Amino acid sequence: MTLLAQLSDLHIREGGALAYGLVDTRAFLARAVDHLNALLPRPDAVVVSGDLVDLGTASEYAMARAELDRLAMPWLPIPGNHDGDAFWDACADRMAAPVRGVGWVARVADTRIVLLDTRVPDALGGAIDETRARWLSERLSESDAPALLVMHHPPIPTGIGHMDAIGLDGVDRLEAALAAGPAPMAILCGHIHRMIVGRLGATPVIVAPSPAHAVTLDLAPDAPSTFHLEPPGVLLHAVSGGRLVTHLSFVGAFDGPHPFFAEGTRLVGT
């Protein structure tokens, strides 16, 4: 089995400043790193699906790396819309043969991970252009090993209107690339700061929560752009025999574990 964790939307701020004047994103990331390091079994690697930092500066990446480099396993990043061009230099040693502005490929145990850049400079939304679509098609067709596709912007509408307005363009190119080669087991995304599950054709789409703040769950078409401080989380993706199972793991200290049964098969409390 390959066990992958997924972090997304870290939004580390300059000098440790609070995001939106309220969210201590570095402290949230530090707790998430501690949580992942304490998991048993320990994940084989951690994919980071974009928005490592908030303003895209080199000093923010230095702060993000100070936490991410504490991970007891490799971490595999791809940029999001908040990441600047500095991402590629700041994370160069974490990527194998990256194509700047396009993507790179990792292998963890028996699982191939194709990491695709969807960032559009100076824009909040993302895009799949012809270069990215062609590169993705070629990477998917290179091997029949199980693959996961990691990118920042989800290729599906989520029903959260203000986030869908800054979603992904060029989904038709993405669908064509998926159809041309062995389809990935799933597309792992971020951007929405919530766990969301959907499908693009026959391919599952799994959106990770943030280890910090959550976009408000409001499905009204005219819902305002707001956030909540809900329990932070990370995803755990278990791959075995070409099959994927995903779990949500909340970050924090919670009461338990408590047994369901005592004295053989008698339920506790009966």
Image (cartoon, rainbow, N blue to C red):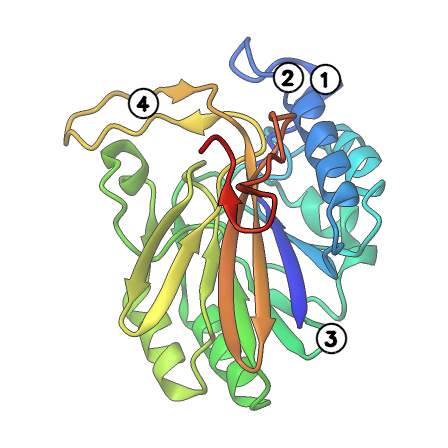
Residue visible at 61% across and 44% down in the picture:
263
For the N terminus, the image quarter is bottom right
The numbered dot on residue 109 is 3
Pointer 3 local density, CA inside 10 Å: few below 14, some 14–19, many at least 20: few
Task: Determine whether the residue tagged by mark 1 lies in a helix, strand or loop.
Answer: helix
**Looking at the image, is mark 1 or mark 3 earlier in the sequence?**
1
Dot 1 or dot 2: first in sequence order is 1
Q: In the rendered image of this protein, does residue 18 appear above or below residue 114?
A: above
Mark 2 to mark 4 CA distance (whole Å) = 19 Å
* Residue identifier under label 1: 16
Counting other residues with Cα less than 10 Å from the Cα at mark 4, is it few (<14), some (14-19), or many (20 or more)?
Answer: few
Residue tagged by mark 4? Answer: 225
Residue at image mark 2: 24
Residue 74 in percent (x, y) is at 79, 56
Q: Are marks 2 and 3 in contact (CB under 8 Å)?
A: no
Which secondary structure, mark 4?
loop
Q: Residue at x 46, y 73 (%)?
A: 185
Instruction: Kindly identify the residue that appears in the image at 36 percent across and 71 percent down.
Output: 203
Side (left or right) of 206 relative to 84: left
Which residue lies most toward the left here?
221
